[in-house]
Image (cartoon, rainbow, N blue to C red):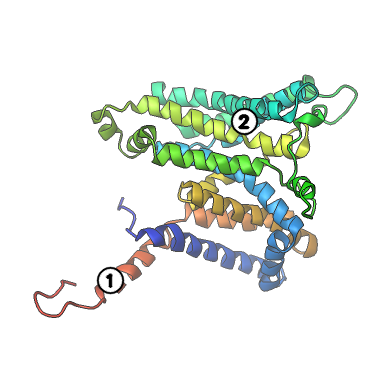
């Protein structure tokens, strides 16, 4: 298999993702046209629904918060040479940890006590759920993709059992816990703005977004500014070189998956403490899988992940607006449009790489030649 064509860094990080996104939107426009709607009108509705109002912006950033946590989790594992498909299950179990803390302390302690404990519990539960696949990969050679997929199903089954038989509020039909105490509610951004005299439309956007930004900064420091991050990247790129340098690939695999699971496990802060205020079925809502596309489109860098998470948040919110305003585009078709973006930005990200690289190298070859001396070979 030939190596991917080389591109300058600005094209790799900026131009290529934009081309992939444009291709996905063009193909989505064809689908919309086949359905009998105007692609241009659909695009305008998508943009205005996501970014045209304060409420739309709030919902976009609310969805983006989930994608930041799971995207960072995927990226950390990817730098260790691992493809963590299990962020959905790790987010599920991590949310269980945060939710149990909120149920326990929500009526007993202030938010300044509840929040740090909930963060630690969510991270610990998510990391613990990632530990077994990590150990199986590091010590027994089991493939991380297979084991993490299986653990997603186990997490879903476990949560269903707990909510139906253990955590359900007595006397109710819906499989969900009782509401958390008010001290476990993360403040919404519009509530914080109101306290300082700024009017912002109500939305679920809450202070978990700030925690996600801090997590992105932490990942950047750990991966690119520490010895451990250097060891992580060396082990991910060449295990033989890592062993020669005295780095244990097995140890790196386990440590990277623990951090990956911890990051995904923090999703419950946004979804449960920030919005739903109870533990309920399927609260990750597929964010663990979207996080894979977010990480790939963001080139597994925290800054890129922030940008791509906002993009996918806009697709989620704008897609809801499309389904509401255009009768021929239902919610399933919105998922198709989102899937096309994931397809081009993830699985087919290299389709345009070779033509773009050929164009770039052709431009270099046609550049100005030096005067005198030996001609530059073409």
| Position of residue 229 measured from the top left corner of the image (x, y, whole percent) | 39, 36
Quadrant hosting residue 149? top right
Label 2, label 1: how many angstroms apart (C-alpha)?
A: 51 Å
- Residue under the image location 77 percent in, 65 percent down: 326
Position of the C terminus by quadrant: bottom left
| Position of residue 226 measured from the top left corner of the image (x, y, whole percent) | 38, 35
- Residue under the image location 37 percent in, 66 percent down: 355
- Few, some or many residues within 10 Å of mark 1 (<14, 14–19, 20+): few
- Residue under the image location 74 percent in, 33 percent down: 281
Residue on which disc 2 sits: 153
* 225 lies left or right of 152: left
Secondary structure, mark 1, is helix
* 83 lies left or right of 102: left
Q: Is residue 228 above or below residue 332?
A: above
Secondary structure, mark 2, is helix
Give the numbered dot on residue 148.
none
């Amino acid at each position: 298999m030939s190596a991917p064509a080389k591109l300058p860094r600005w094209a790799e990080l900026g131009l290529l993702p934009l081309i992939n996104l444009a291709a996905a939107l063009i193909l989505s426009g064809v689908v919309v046209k086949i359905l009998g709607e105007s692609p241009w009108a659909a695009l305008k509705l998508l943009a205005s629904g996501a970014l045209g109002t304060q409420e739309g912006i709030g919902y976009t950033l609310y969805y983006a918060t989930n994608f930041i946590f799971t995207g960072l989790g995927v990226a950390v594992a990817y730098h260790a040479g691992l493809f963590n498909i299990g962020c959905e299950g790790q987010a599920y179990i991590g949310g269980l940890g945060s939710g149990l803390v909120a149920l326990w302390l929500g009526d007993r302690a202030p938010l300044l006590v509840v929040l740090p404990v909930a963060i630690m519990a969510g991270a610990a539960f998510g990391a613990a759920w990632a530990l077994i696949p990590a150990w199986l990969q590091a010590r027994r050679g089991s493939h991380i993709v297979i084991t993490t997929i299986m653990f997603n199903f186990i997490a879903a089954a476990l949560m269903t059992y707990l909510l139906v038989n253990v955590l359900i509020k007595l006397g109710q039909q819906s499989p969900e816990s009782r509401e958390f105490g008010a001290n476990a509610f993360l403040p919404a951004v519009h509530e914080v703005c109101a306290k300082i005299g700024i009017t912002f439309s109500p939305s679920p956007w809450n202070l978990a977004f700030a925690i996600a930004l801090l997590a992105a900064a932490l990942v950047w420091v750990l991966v690119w500014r520490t010895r451990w991050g250097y060891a992580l990247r060396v082990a991910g790129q060449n295990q033989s070189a890592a062993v020669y340098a005295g780095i244990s690939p097995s140890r790196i695999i386990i440590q990277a998956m623990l951090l990956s699971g911890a990051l995904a496990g923090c999703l419950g802060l946004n979804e449960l403490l920030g919005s739903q205020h109870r533990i309920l079925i399927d609260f990750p809502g597929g964010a663990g899988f979207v996080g894979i596309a977010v990480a790939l489109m963001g080139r597994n860098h925290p800054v890129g992940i922030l940008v791509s998470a906002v993009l996918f948040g806009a697709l989620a919110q704008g897609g809801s607006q499309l389904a509401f305003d255009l009768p021929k585009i239902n919610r399933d078709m919105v998922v198709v449009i989102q899937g096309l973006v994931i397809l081009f930005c993830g699985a087919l990200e290299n389709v345009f790489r070779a033509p773009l690289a050929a164009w770039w190298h052709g431009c270099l070859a046609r550049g100005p030649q030096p005067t005198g001396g030996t001609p530059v070979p073409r």
